[in-house]
Each structure stands twice: as C-alpha cells, then as structure tokens.
Amino acid sequence: MALPTQKSKVYAFTLVEVTLALGIIVFAMIPMFALVPIGLSSFRNAIDATAAAHIIQSQVNEAQLTNFSILTSGTTKTAYYDEEGQSYDSSGAPIQPNTFLHKYTAMVTVSGTTTLPTASLNDAIALLKITISDVANPKESKTYTARIANLGI
C-alpha cells in the first residue's frame, strides 16, 4: 500500500521582485557613495585645523617665554612640524625640513610692538604673525595673528 504524498507549496521571490529590490537599494546607495569624498575632505580639513592649533599654541607659548626685548626685534623664524603639529619626533630630535616627518612649515614673524596708553613699563604688546603652509600644497598657506603681552620676562 502506497502512502499518499503531500505536495508542499514553496513561497519565494520572483526574479522581477528581486531585480526591483536590488534597483531600489542601488538607487539609495549611490548618493551615499557620492558623499564619501566630501567626508574625507572634511576629515582632512579637521586634521589640518587641529595641527594648526597645536602649532599656533606652541609658537605663542614660546613667544610668551621669550625675553620681550628679543621678541620685539622684528625677527622671523621658521619651524618644521609633523602631521600632528609636533616639532619633535619620538626620539626628541627636532623635525628637519624635507624629511618624511616634515608636514607643515611655520613662518613666525614679529611685525611690531604697540605701547598701551598707560604709563607702566610692561604695557607693550607685540604682534606675532604665524604663517602655516602644508608641504604637499605650499601655495595654500594660512596666516594667523596673536598678540603677545610684555610679561616682564
């Protein structure tokens, strides 16, 4: 005696449904892939801004610790930095120009001093101009200014 066989119904997607679903997914993914270069550019700009902040802070700190009479002499100095805005490598040696660590160049210029209207001896301010350029793109340099007070050092 033969047993009756049950025929089960199989539920599946048709080829048209799968193709339509893939088309919708691809249509939604194209704009997201188009945003990747914009995101990378913003990321690079953020890294540059952070490094510039480190460079500016180190130069202002150095200027504040310098004797004010030396600072006002109108000198210009060049400093070299790595991609993180550090002027020294891991061994403590200064970053040298045209090496693989050299990423940013900072030109620091004291462009003059201003005496405040009060009569005190230490009431003078020096204007510090810091121009930071990227080694990979030296034409796009950015200039920042800071005012350094005479701290009596």
Image: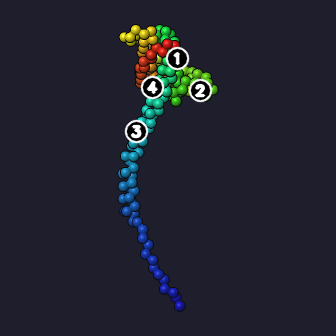
Residue type at tag 3: Ile
Determine whether label 3 and label 1 are within 8 Å by CB.
Answer: no
Residue type at tag 2: Asp
Residue at label 3? 38
Residue type at tag 4: Asn
Given this view, does label 4 or label 2 mark the residue nearer the observer? Answer: 2
Residue type at tag 1: Leu
Given this view, does label 1 or label 2 mark the residue nearer the observer? Answer: 1
Residue 43, visible in the rendered structure: yes
Q: Residues within 10 Å of mark 3 (few under 14, many from 20)?
A: few
Choose the circle earlier in sequence order: 4 or 2: 2
Choose the circle earlier in sequence order: 1 or 4: 1
Q: Tell me how many marks there are.
A: 4
Give residue 65's mark. 1
Residue 102, visible in the rendered structure: no
Residue drawn where x is 40% and y is 66% of the image: 13
Looking at the image, residue 100 sits to the left or right of residue 21; the answer is right
Residue drawn where x is 53% and y is 21% of the image: 80
Residue at label 2? 89
Q: Estimate the spatial distance between the alpha carbons at disc 4 and disc 3, rounded to whole Å.
A: 19 Å
Residue drawn where x is 53% and y is 24% of the image: 81
